[in-house]
Amino acid sequence: MISGLQPALAFILAQFQRLKSAIRQYPVRAALALPALALLYVLLLVPFTPGIGDLRKAKSEAPSVLLATDGSVLAEYKRINRQWVTLEQISPHVVNALIATEDRRFYQHHGIDLRRLAGAALSTLSGDLQGGSTITQQLARNLFPEEIGRAATL
């Protein structure tokens, strides 16, 4: 089995050497390649993202659960016993408390906090698993669990 891997390893090493040579020869292009690939990835995802109409139609069937600090369930709020209110009817202190605990930089980004994502990635790579999602990303995950999934992924 190892002898069958040798040609593949030789090919990978040759490609790696070509990549190193290209980076040395064209450092500016190499520096621009990663941001360009990230932008291309985002542009490819745009057609698959839900629109405003989809967000208005989304309904969460799962009940909201209020937990105590020990993990015991204090209350469950199902659709039948919820009272929907406008944002203006909610105390600004409640809104500020939510933002302070879930997404401190909420007003400094547009749904994706790149600084927090980078920090979470570095912490996770060093062995300290951290989340980097914003309130916006958490809402998307909760409204579209089948499409997005619940796994902890980038």
Image (cartoon, rainbow, N blue to C red):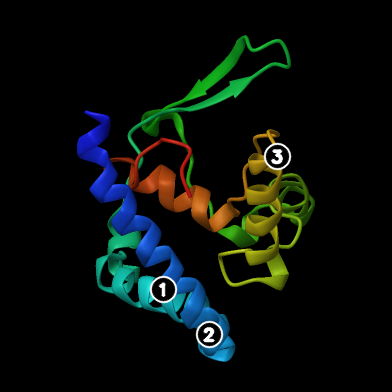
Dot label at residue 126: 3
Q: Name the residue that disc number 2 marks.
A: 32
- C-alpha span from label 2 to label 3: 26 Å
**Residue at (56%, 66%) from the top-left corner?**
111
Dot label at residue 86: none
Corner quadrant of residue 48: bottom left
Query: In x, y percent, where is residue 61?
Result: 33, 34
**Could you say which is closer to the camera, residue 15 or residue 35?**
15
**Residue at (32%, 68%) from the top-left corner?**
45
Q: Is residue 27 above or below residue 63?
A: below
Relative to 70, is 42 on the left or the right? left
Corner quadrant of residue 128: top right
Q: Residues within 10 Å of mark 3 (few under 14, many from 20)?
A: few
Q: Is residue 21 visible?
A: yes
**Residue at (58%, 90%) from the top-left corner?**
28
Q: Name the residue that disc number 1 marks.
A: 18
Q: Nearer the viewer, mark 2 or mark 1?
A: 1
Q: Is residue 134 above or below residue 5?
A: below
Q: Is residue 10 above or below residue 29?
A: above
| Quadrant for the N terminus in the image | top left
| Among the two numbered marks 2 and 3 on one chain, the one whose residue lies closer to the N terminus | 2
Relative to 131, is 105 on the left or the right? right
Q: Residues within 10 Å of mark 2 (few under 14, many from 20)?
A: few
Amino acid beneath label 3: Ser
- C-alpha span from label 2 to label 1: 18 Å
Instruction: Label 3: state its secondary structure.
Output: loop
Query: In x, y percent, where is residue 91?
Result: 73, 52
